[in-house]
Image (tube, rainbow, N blue to C red):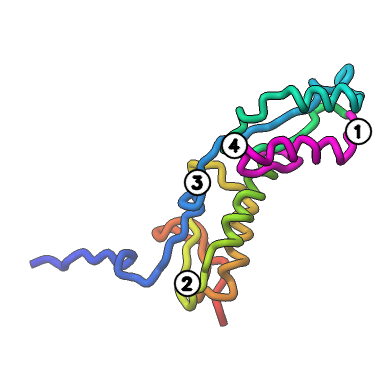
Amino acid sequence: MPDEIINRVANSKLVTLNLEDYYPEGKRVMFDIKDWLFQGFVLREKDFRTQVSEFDWPQYKDNYVALTCSSDAIIPAWAFMLLSIHLEPFAKKVLVGNLETLETSIYQDVLNDLDVSSYANKPIIIKGCAKKPVPQNAYIMLSNKLKPFAKSIMYGESCSSVPLYKKK
């Protein structure tokens, strides 16, 4: 009888972590206030407040919202604060920035709540090639969080991983 094929990866103590598994559901949207500015550049407080009070905020229910201004206008901090106050009852998260900044912040929340103590003294592979928009910063945050616990940290797939860290 020929030698039996043994799947050493399946039998190893190797633990694979896929950041896609922690991807929170919810639409990610940009909210650009440029169109609420006079000629796209000047924030007139009375007009701005009127637009804010008349806007349909419930449409952002369960969304993650990145507030921005795509024109070169100088926007006072209170304007973004006012928008976030109106979005807060509906949106899952609101911040000033772009969609990558938003995604990074979402993952920061997820990873802050992730208990990694069960990975103590285990070899870990952080899976790459995500189909969902996992930001680069999430990989950095995860590897830094795992480092005090893991025996080793690698990136990629179990068949072709790149070693990143090995406990001495």
Indicate yes or no whether the magenta region holds residue 68: no
Q: Nearer the viewer, residue 95 or 89?
A: 89
State which quadrant residue 166 falls in: bottom right
Does residue 128 appear anywhere in the picture?
A: no
Q: Earlier in the sequence, mark 4 or mark 1?
A: 4
Name the secondary structure under disc 2.
Answer: helix
Q: Secondary structure at mark 3?
A: loop
Relative to 121, is 138 on the left or the right?
right
Q: Residue at x 84, y 25 (%)?
A: 48
Above/below status of 127 relative to 91: below
What secondary structure is found at the residue carrying circle 4?
A: loop
Between marks 2 and 1, how big is the CA–CA gap?
Answer: 47 Å
Question: Which one is closest to the eye, mark 4 or mark 3?
Answer: 4
- Viewer-nearest of discs 2 and 3: 2
Q: Check if mark 2's residue and mark 1's residue have beta carbons within 8 Å.
A: no
Q: Position of residue 11 (x, y in %)?
A: 30, 69
Give the residue at x 50% y 59%. 126
Q: What quarter of the picture does the C terminus occupy?
A: bottom right
The amino acid on which the numbered mark 4 sits, given as a three-letter code, is Asn
Label annotation for residue 74 = 1
Q: Residues within 10 Å of mark 2 (few under 14, many from 20)?
A: some
Dot 3 corresponds to which residue?
A: 130
Magenta stretch: includes residue 94: yes
Q: Which residue type does callout 3 highlight?
A: Ala
Specify the farthest residue to the bottom. Answer: 168
- Residue that mark 4 sits on: 63
Magenta range is: 73-99
Where in the figure is residue 16, as x and y percent of width and height? 43, 61
- The residue at 76%/41% (across/down) is 96
Quarter occupied by the N terminus:
bottom left
